[in-house]
Image (cartoon, rainbow, N blue to C red):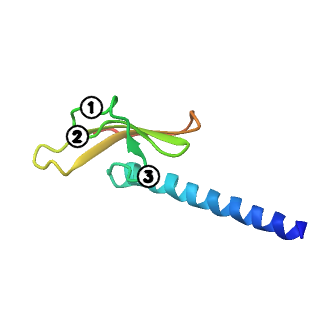
Amino acid sequence: MNKKIIKIFIISVVALLVVWLSLLITDSLLSICFNKKPIFATADVNTIQKDGGSGLYKGLGYSLKIKGTSSATSNELFNIYYTEIKIFNFTIYIHNSSN
């Protein structure tokens, strides 16, 4: 009986870890590769700038600090030139591209 409980516990922990990593990777790739704001992390209202979305976005155990500029022709386009990803307040990745 104990082996079955341990097996269920390990499978549950691995499943939660996979879901958490998929949320983190999705938000990271959106901001780094596709110039989009994160969809699973919520914006910290106190840090959002008036440029269309620069600021701090907080997820479950991770955060993304994004700096970018809005397109002059369209409000939908947002060019992200800086992304800093932190997991549990430790910086793991910084992406800095020039305009």
Question: What element does badge 3 sit on?
Answer: helix
Instruction: Evaluate if marks 1 and 3 touch, with contact meaning CB atoms under 8 Å apart.
Output: no
Which amino acid is tagged 3?
A: Asp
Q: Quadrant of residue 44?
A: top left
Taking depth in this image into account, of 28 and 7 the one nearest to the observer is 7
Residue in the picture at 39% in, 44% down: 42
Instruction: Report the quarter where the N terminus lies.
Output: bottom right
Task: Say which residue label 3 marks.
Answer: 27
Task: Say which residue label 2 marks.
Answer: 52
Instruction: Report the quarter where the C terminus lies.
Output: top left
Q: Quadrant of residue 97?
A: top left
Taking depth in this image into account, of 3 and 30 the one nearest to the observer is 3
The residue carrying pointer 2 sits among few (fewer than 14), some (14 to 19) or many (20 or more) residues within 10 Å by Cα, namely some
Question: What element does badge 2 sit on?
Answer: loop
Task: Say which residue label 1 marks.
Answer: 49
Q: Position of residue 59 (x, y in %)?
A: 48, 45
